[in-house]
Image: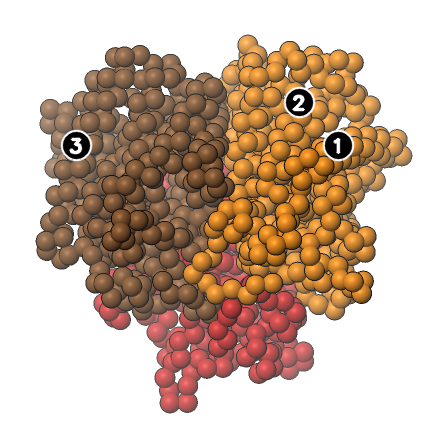
Chain colours: A red, B brown, C orange
Amino acid sequence: MEETLFTVNNVWMMICTALVFLMHLGFSLLEIGLTRQKNTINILFKNVFIICIGLVLYALVGFNLMYPGSFIAGIIPDYFVDLFGLSMPENGLTAGYADGGYTYWTDFLFQGMFAATAATIVSGAVAERIKLGAFMIFTIIYVGLVYPIVGSWKWGAGWLDSLGFYDFAGSTLVHSVGGWAALVAVWLLGARIGKFKKDGSVGAIPGHNMPFATAGVFILWLGWFGFNGGSVLSAAPGATSLVLVTTCIAAASGGLGAFLVSLFKYKQYDLSMFLNGVLGGLVGITAGADLMSVTDAILIGFIAGALIVLGVALIDKLKLDDPVGAIAVHLICGIWGTLAVGIFGDLAGWAQLGYQAVGIFAIGATCLISAYAIIKTLKSTVGIRVSKEEEQEGLDIHEHGMDAYPDFRLNQH
Amino acid sequence: MEETLFTVNNVWMMICTALVFLMHLGFSLLEIGLTRQKNTINILFKNVFIICIGLVLYALVGFNLMYPGSFIAGIIPDYFVDLFGLSMPENGLTAGYADGGYTYWTDFLFQGMFAATAATIVSGAVAERIKLGAFMIFTIIYVGLVYPIVGSWKWGAGWLDSLGFYDFAGSTLVHSVGGWAALVAVWLLGARIGKFKKDGSVGAIPGHNMPFATAGVFILWLGWFGFNGGSVLSAAPGATSLVLVTTCIAAASGGLGAFLVSLFKYKQYDLSMFLNGVLGGLVGITAGADLMSVTDAILIGFIAGALIVLGVALIDKLKLDDPVGAIAVHLICGIWGTLAVGIFGDLAGWAQLGYQAVGIFAIGATCLISAYAIIKTLKSTVGIRVSKEEEQEGLDIHEHGMDAYPDFRLNQH
Amino acid sequence: MEETLFTVNNVWMMICTALVFLMHLGFSLLEIGLTRQKNTINILFKNVFIICIGLVLYALVGFNLMYPGSFIAGIIPDYFVDLFGLSMPENGLTAGYADGGYTYWTDFLFQGMFAATAATIVSGAVAERIKLGAFMIFTIIYVGLVYPIVGSWKWGAGWLDSLGFYDFAGSTLVHSVGGWAALVAVWLLGARIGKFKKDGSVGAIPGHNMPFATAGVFILWLGWFGFNGGSVLSAAPGATSLVLVTTCIAAASGGLGAFLVSLFKYKQYDLSMFLNGVLGGLVGITAGADLMSVTDAILIGFIAGALIVLGVALIDKLKLDDPVGAIAVHLICGIWGTLAVGIFGDLAGWAQLGYQAVGIFAIGATCLISAYAIIKTLKSTVGIRVSKEEEQEGLDIHEHGMDAYPDFRLNQH
C-alpha cells in the first residue's frame, strides 16, 4: 500500500480513537445527569477510574488477549504467550500492518478505548448504591478478561467469526457485553430505596441535572462518529461516509421514535426518553452500520427508539432498578441491532439471522455466567451494596468526603 | 483525481461534519445558559428535536431540494423530481463526485448538519414562551422547505450564484435565514412577561447558568472550524488553513470588540457581551472567510463585536425581546459579514457590494415573508404562545412534567 | 514532497489545532469547578479574554518573535525586524514550508493556540482574588513577550536547542513557563481569606462544581491528543500514534498514581486528586512523549501522579494558596517530565539529564524574574488584589455585576 494512503488511514483512525475516548465524558455526564446530586462524585470517580484502569489493563493484558497470535482451538486465546506487555509485530508501524489501515499503536489505542466502554455501561445501571471497591474489582476482571475473550470470538477471528456472525462495531460485542453485566448487577444489587413502593407503584427518582444528561448524549453521538466510523478500520471513503450517515440517521430516528411512542403512551414530551431513544438508535445501528441504506437506518433507529420506551417500562415491571436506562439502551437495543443485520441490509436472510441469534446467545450466556460468578462472589465476600444510611445520605459524603456542589442549597431526597 | 487525495479530502469533510454536528450542543448550552432554569428542559427538548427531525427531513426532502438535478428557470428547484429519498449519482462514491472533495454521503451529511442550524438560531430567540408544538411545525416547514429553496439560489448554482453574489459559508444563507425568522417570531410572539415594564424601562432577565453559556460559545467556536473549514469542500491546504485563521482571528477580535465597546458604554466587564461578540465575529467572517487577510479578519470581527453591543441595545429599544441575542448575532452580523465581502478582501469593490446587497435583500424578503406566513398561520390556528400561567411557572413543568434540577433549591422569578 | 502527503499532514495539524483550542474550554471548566461559585463569571471572563487576546497578540507580535527570521546571538530574537504583522514566506502554502508538515497559516494557528495556554495556567492559580485589570495586563506582556522569547530558545532553534535540551511538546516551554508565573503570582498575591488559619491549620475551600472540574479534565485530556500529537509537526504514522499512546497511558497512570497515593495517605477516594493526577501524567509525558515505551509512560505517569499528591501538600505547607493545584500540575510535573527525558526512553543518559537541567534552570530563572518584575510592578502601581469586601462577596458581583447562577439558592462562604 502506498505510504500516503496509509498515513491518511492512520489519521482517520487516530481521530476516531479520540472521539471514542470522549465517549467516556459523555457517559459520565449522562450518568450523573440522570441520578441524584448526592452520588455525583461517586459516579464521576468510577468513570475516571474506568478509563484509567481500562487503558492500563488493556496495555498489560487485554490487547494480547483479544487479538492473540495463537488460539487454543479458536475458543480461548492463548493468553499465556503474550501476557504482560505489548509485543509489536515487525510491520507494526508500516503499511504492512492491518492492511495499511493503521499502525500497531493506533490499533491498540482504538481498541483500548473500546474496551473501557463495556464497564462504563454497567456503571450507570448500578449507580447510587454499589460499593466503590466492589465495582472497581468487577471492572478490572470484566474489562481485563471477559470483554477481550468474548471479543476475540469475532474480532480476534475466532469461532463466531468463522461461523458467519456479523457485528460491525459492537452492538453485541461491546454494548450487550456491558448490558448483560448490567442486568446481572442490577438484579443482585436490588433496587434503590424508594424505587419500588410497598403498594406496588414505582417511585420516580428524577435525575438531578438534565443539561448534563443532554450534553452527555450529544457527546456520545459525536463519539459514535468514531466508534462506528473507526470500525471501518481505514478511511475508505465510501464505507466511512456511509457509516456516518447510517449512524446519524439511526440516532435521529431513534430519538424521534422514542419521543413519539412516549408521547402516545404517556401524553408527555419526555426529554429522558428522547435522549435514550437517540442512544438506542445508535446502539441499534452499530452492528450493521456499514450494511444499511438510509431507509434501513431510519427503520432500525425508529424501532430501537420504540424499544427504549417499551423496554424501560418492562424493566420497571420486572422490579429491576436501572437508574439511567442502560439495560434498555445497551442490552435490548444491542440485541435488536444484532438481529437487524439478518433482517435489513446487504446480509439480510434467514441464515444470517440464525448466525446472529447464535452470537447473541453464546455471548449472552457467557456474559451472564461470568458476571454472575464475579458479582455473586463479591457479594458474598466484600459485599456489593452500601449501607442503608450511606445510600440515604449519599455516597459522595461517605466514600469520598466531598460534596459535588457545596455552594448550592440542596433538597435531600 | 488521485484516490488518496480524494480519501484525504473526504476525511477532512467528515471531521468538519462532526464539528458542525457538535454546534447543536453548543447552541443548546448557550440557549439554556442565557435563559431561566424553569425553561431548561423545554429548550433542550427543542434542540434535540431540531437535529433529529432536521437530519431525517433532509434525507427525505431537503437535500434534493437544495442541490437539485434540474431547475425551473433557476429559481424554484424542480423538487417534484427527486422528492422523497436520496438518489445517488453514479459517481457518488468516487473521486468523480464533487471534484473529488468528498463522497455523496459526506455531502449529504455535511449539508444536513448545516440545515438544522437555521432552526436552532430561531430556537434561542423564541425561548421561554413559544408553544412546543407550534415551534416543531415551524421547524419542519422552515428547515424542510424555506432553507433549502433559498440555499439553492446560491449553493445550488441558482440565480444569485449566476449574478455574482458571494457567501462562502453562510453569513446570509444560514445565519441570516435563521435570523430573519427569529425577528419575525419575536415580533409576533411578543415579549416575555416582565421584560418591558410599563414605565418604559427594560427588566433584565438574567440567564441561569453562565458556565453553560460559556461552554456553549467555546463549542460553537470549535464547531466553526468545521462550518467554515468544511465549506472549502475539500482539504486544499492553503484554503482550509487560511479559513481557520481568519475564522479564529475574527472570533477573537469580535470578542474583544464587544468587550471594549460594552466596557466603554456600560463601564462593566460584561461576560454575555463578550461571548456574543465572539459569535458575532464568527458570523461576520463566515461570508468571506476564504477571501480575507489577517488584518481584514481583525477588522471584520471587531466591527461585528461592536455591532453586537449596539444591536442588542437597538433590539431592546424596539421592544423586541430576544433572550439570547440571536438577532444581533445571526441577523445583524450576518448582514454585516455579507456586506464585508464587498468592502474587504479579494472581491472588494462597488459591484460586489451591490451583488451582496441584492442577495441580502432577496433572501431577507423571502425569509421575512415565508416566516411571517408560517408563524402568522400558526398564531391564528394552534396558537404560538403558552398561557400566562405556564410562562410564569415555567414550560418545563407544564409541557414536560419535569424539572431540570430537582435536587437544587431554586428562586422562582 | 508529494502534494497529497502535504495535504494529509496539514489536515492532521489543523485537527490538532482545534483540539488545543478546545483545551481553553477544559481549563475554564476545571478552574471554575475547583473554585467557588461567587467567582465563576470572573474566571470565565479571564479565560475567554486569554484566548481572544492571545490569538490577536500572537498575530501581531508573538509568532514573529518566537520563530524569527534572524537572531541576535541566538538569544534574543531580532524582533524589531518582523514586528507587527505576519510576513508569509514565499513557500508558506506549499509543501516546501516546514518540510511539508503544514502551511504557514496552520503553523501560526497551532502555535497561537499553544501560546495562550501559558496564561491560562496562571489564571487558575490566582483565581478568586486577583484584580481583573492587573491580570489582563500581565497576560498581554507574558503571552506577548516572555512566552515567545523563551520558546524561541528551543523551538525557534535558539541556544537551548543547539545545546541539546529536549522538550517535545512543552513540559517546560509551555507548562513550566505558566507554572513559574503561577508560583510568583500566588506568592505576591497572598492566600485567599480563610485558607490558612491563625492556628496554622489549612482551611479547605472546596470547589463548587465537581462535574465541571471533571468535564474540564476529560476535555483537557482530549486536547492533549492535539497538544502532543500535533507536536510531531506532521502526520507521520509511527510518531503520531506512539505519541497518542504514551500520552494516554501516562494520563491514565497519572490518575491511578494520584488516586492510590492519596488513598494511602488520606484514606479517601479523592476525586480532585484523581483528576489532577491525570493532568500531572499528561504534563509529565509531554517533554518526551515521542521517546518513551508504554512501560516508560506508565512509570512517568505514575510518578507524576504521586508528585501531585505530595506537591499539593508541600504547597499548602509553604502557605502558598493555589486553588486549583496549578503549580503541582504544571510546574512540578513539568519539571519532572523534562527531567524524565534524561532518565527514560531513547535519549536517557547523564549528559541529556544535564541538558534538561540547564533548560529547566535557564527558563525557570527567566520566567521567575520576568514574572516577578511584571507582577511586582503591577502590585506597586495599579494593585493586584481585590478589596477584602470584594473577595468575600465575590468578584462576579463586584467586577461584572452578574451572578453565574441567579436562579439557584446559594450558600455564601
**Residue B368 seen in this snapshot:** yes
Chain under callout 3: B
Q: CA distance from mark 2 to mark 1?
A: 21 Å
C179 and A385: which is toward the camera: C179
Q: Residue at label 3?
A: B365
Q: Residue at x 47, y 29 (%)?
A: B253
Residue furthest toward the front? Answer: B199
Q: Residue at x 55, y 23 (%)?
A: C59
Q: Residue at x 27, y 17 (%)?
A: B353
* Mark 3 and mark 2 residues within 8 Å of each other at the beta carbon: no
Specify which label sits upstream in the sequence, 2 or 1.
Answer: 2
Q: Residue at label 1?
A: C373
* Mark 1 and mark 3 residues within 8 Å of each other at the beta carbon: no
Q: Residue at label 2?
A: C66
Q: Is residue C254 left or right of residue C56?
A: right
Q: Is residue A91 left or right of residue B74?
A: right
Q: Is residue C409 left or right of residue B69?
A: right
Determine crowd level at label 1: few under 14, some 14-19, many 20+ residues with C-alpha closer than 10 A: few
C175 and A355: which is toward the camera: C175
Residue furthest toward the bottom? Answer: A199
Quadrant where the N terminus of chain A lies?
top right
Q: CA distance from mark 1 to mark 3?
A: 59 Å
The x and y percentages for residue C95 are 55, 17
C5 and C244: which is toward the camera: C244
The x and y percentages for residue A318 are 40, 80
